């Protein structure tokens, strides 16, 4: 089936559970921004 992923709610678990997911530059940027923010806490 087709898995629809909300980019704002994407997380590492989603990536691990969807190994066939094609990582686009946009998703990578979102993840980088998210984890950079978490690191600053």
Image (tube, rainbow, N blue to C red):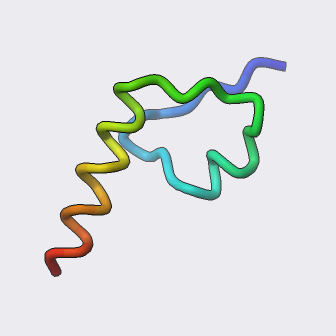
Image location of residue 16, percent across then percent down? 70, 51
Q: Residue furthest left?
A: 40
Answer left or right for 7 relative to 3: left
Q: Is residue 3 above or below residue 12?
A: above
For the residue pair 39 and 6, the one nearer the viewer reads as 39
Image location of residue 24, percent across then percent down? 46, 23
What residue is at 31 percent from the left and 62 percent from the top? 35
What residue is at 67 percent from the left and 29 percent from the top? 21
For the residue pair 29 and 9, the one nearer the viewer reads as 29
Q: Is residue 38 above or below residue 32?
A: below
User: Which quarter of the figure has residue 41?
Assistant: bottom left
What residue is at 41 percent from the left and 33 percent from the top? 27
For the residue pair 22 and 13, the one nearer the viewer reads as 22
Answer left or right for 1 relative to 20: right
Answer left or right for 2 relative to 14: right
Numbered label tally: 0
Image location of residue 32, percent across then percent down? 31, 50
User: Which quarter of the figure has residue 13?
Assistant: bottom right
Q: Residue furthest top?
A: 2
The quadrant the N terminus occupies is top right
User: Which quarter of the figure has residue 4?
Assistant: top right
Answer left or right for 13 relative to 41: right
What residue is at 19 percent from the left and 64 percent from the top? 37
Q: Residue furthest bottom?
A: 41
């Amino acid at each position: 089936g087709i898995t629809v992923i909300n980019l704002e709610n994407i997380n590492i678990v989603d990536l691990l559970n969807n190994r066939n997911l094609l990582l686009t530059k946009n998703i990578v940027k979102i993840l980088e921004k998210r984890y950079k923010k978490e690191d600053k806490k």
